[in-house]
Amino acid sequence: INDLLLSYKIDSYKLGLLTAHEAFHSIVSMGFQQSLKKDIDFKNSEFNLLYFLQNISEEGIADLIDKPFLLHKNSPLYNETKALVENDESLSITYINKIDSLLKSALINVNSLNEYKSFAQLANIYGQNGGHIPGRFMGLRIKEGGMLENHISYVQNPISFFLCYNT
């Protein structure tokens, strides 16, 4: 959730920080969209899963842009950001395990995805805050593991994000 006052506070602290986060989404989303087949069925359960994985991937990298700055003690949004990331690790691990189970189930029987009728359903069961959780945790682990540069080359591909995280 963003508002004008929040945007002002962020830009007063680090000019362009919020814009950089959002610009990343714009650029990567366009690359992702362009990589899709022209006749893709956007209501297909397999596409919903791919799109959900894309959101996790995008948020995971976009949060590497702004969250480290916003978590500095001198940030005007330190308390709000600190509260936002509270329990990230435990929540993320739970969601990652659930996503792993979902992917294994879909591998065995792709029809198992049919119970999820929408992107929102997947997002509400297997993630939180639009994919920020578990994306933020995964992105940080990718960076700490030295795999960020590997993923950046394929940043529009959400599977790259998950492969880099697994590595």
Image (cartoon, grey):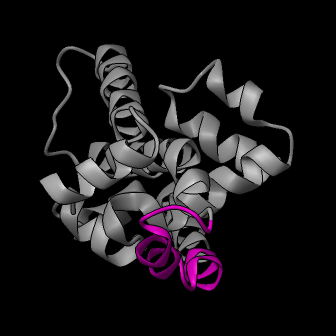
Q: Nearer the viewer, residue 28 or 66?
A: 66
Q: Can residue 3 be spotted in the picture?
A: no
Q: Nearer the viewer, residue 26 or 155?
A: 26
Magenta stretch, residue numbers: 73-94
Look at 40% across and 60% down and name the residue there: 131
In reply to whether residue 75 is colored magenta, the answer given is: yes
* Above/below status of 67 relative to 86: above
Q: Position of residue 30 (x, y in %)?
A: 30, 20
Report which quarter residue 1 is drawn in: bottom left
In the image, what residue occupies the spot 25% across and 49% down?
Answer: 7
Residue 154 picture quarter: top right
28 sits to left or right of 34? right
Coordinates of residue 22 in the picture (x, y in percent): 33, 36
Residue ID at (37%, 16%)? 35
Residue situated in front as seen by the camera: 150 or 40: 150
> Could you tell me which residue is drawn at 63 percent across and 50 percent down?
139
User: Does the rendering let one see residue 93?
Assistant: yes
Give the total of numbered labels: 0
93 falls in the magenta region? yes
Above or below for 48 versus 137: above
Magenta: predominant secondary structure element?
Answer: helix
Nearer to me, 115 or 128: 128
Q: How far from the left and from the top, in percent, is residue 93?
A: 64, 77
- The image position of residue 118, as x and y in percent, is 17, 60
